[in-house]
Image (cartoon, rainbow, N blue to C red):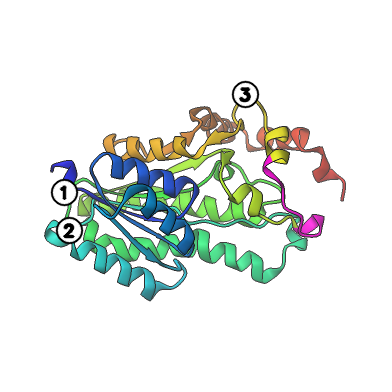
């Protein structure tokens, strides 16, 4: 199918990785649906890309009726009403020791990071089935390779996304629909500066704090949001690969955990000595 007839639906596209994905796929001739709660971010995206082949809508991914309606309207404008790629990307974070994070805040993370992926899967499947070789792609996290302290609930939701990806990658073969995910490390997006630390009186980090603290090389070096968009593009073009890691070296955490999760836990304790303070 020519690129001009291909389409992608991206949640959380008002900023960060989703925005970069919208720009990349649009630049390569795809029809793009960019949805987000952030109307200002969507307006800015329209300013950057124009209205040709770009469709935007304010959508709260935790509202099933809103997400379903957006999918129906966008896909209704596609040839045969199908969809080539669904990217479940919307996500939020809350940090701090588990008991310091308010229950309602933790449940909001579950709602956005995992339940909304389920909603996206249910909603998108009828449209994906109309396009042979289509892809459901979801944003997981490097914290899905091993449970990470001080982001325990966030990490758990990303493990859930990874597990769902693995299960549906088998189930949906009978529909001709592929399923994959991306496990980003430290990515330069707003979530880094907007996530409150409830064990530090709700303090958030500044971009200067993050740049100063981030390793200059290695698995958890600070990466641009465009690197995740590149992984999404590669995932569509390479049908056999299930998990995409950014940077690719993060895959070694998964491999080592399979050999000895206790060893990986020991390395985390060594790298994050403050987890033993309380």
Q: Position of residue 227 (x, y in %)?
A: 46, 35
Relative horizontal placement of residue 7, taking residue 185 as reference (left or right): left
Q: Which residue matches tag 1?
A: 5
Labels 2 and 3 touching (C-beta < 8 A): no
Q: Earlier in the sequence, mark 2 or mark 3?
A: 2
Using the image as rendered, state which of residue 103 and residue 87 is in the foreground. Answer: 87
Labels 1 and 3 touching (C-beta < 8 A): no
Magenta part of the chain: 198-207
Instruction: Please tell me whether residue 202 belongs to the stretch shown in magenta.
Output: yes
Q: Report whether residue 180 is seen.
A: no
Q: What SS does tag 1 mark?
A: helix
Tell me which residue sits at (72%, 33%) in the image. Answer: 212
Q: Which residue matches tag 2?
A: 78
Using the image as rendered, state which of residue 242 and residue 53 is in the foreground. Answer: 53
Q: Residues within 10 Å of mark 1 (few under 14, many from 20)?
A: some
Q: Which residue matches tag 3?
A: 217
Q: Residues within 10 Å of mark 3 (few under 14, many from 20)?
A: few
Q: What SS does tag 2 mark?
A: loop
């Amino acid at each position: 199918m020519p690129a001009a007839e291909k389409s992608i639906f991206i949640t959380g596209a008002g900023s960060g990785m989703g925005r970069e994905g919208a720009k990349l796929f649009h630049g390569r001739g795809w029809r793009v649906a960019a949805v987000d709660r952030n109307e200002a971010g969507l307006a800015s995206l329209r300013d950057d890309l124009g209205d040709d082949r770009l469709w935007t809508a304010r959508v709260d991914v935790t509202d099933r009726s809103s997400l379903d309606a957006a999918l129906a309207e966008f896909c209704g404008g596609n040839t045969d009403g199908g969809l080539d790629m669904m990217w479940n990307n919307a996500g939020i974070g809350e940090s701090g020791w588990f008991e310091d994070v308010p229950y309602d805040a933790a449940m909001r993370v579950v709602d956005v990071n995992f339940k909304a992926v389920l909603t996206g899967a249910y909603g998108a499947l009828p449209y994906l089935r109309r396009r042979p070789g289509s892809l459901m792609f979801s944003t997981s996290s490097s914290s899905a390779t091993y449970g990470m302290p001080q982001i325990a609930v966030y990490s758990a939701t990303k493990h859930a996304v990874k597990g769902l990806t693995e299960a549906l990658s088998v189930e949906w073969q009978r529909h001709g629909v592929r399923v994959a995910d991306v496990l980003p490390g430290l990515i330069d997006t707003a979530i880094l500066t907007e996530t409150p630390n409830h064990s530090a009186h709700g303090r958030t980090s500044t971009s200067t704090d993050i740049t100063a603290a981030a390793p200059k090389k290695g698995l958890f070096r600070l990466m641009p949001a465009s690197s995740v968009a590149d992984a999404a593009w590669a995932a569509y073009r390479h049908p056999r690969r299930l998990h995409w890691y950014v940077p690719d070296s993060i895959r070694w955490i998964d491999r080592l955990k399979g050999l000895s999760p206790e060893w990986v836990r020991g390395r985390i304790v060594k790298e994050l000595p403050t987890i033993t303070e309380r």
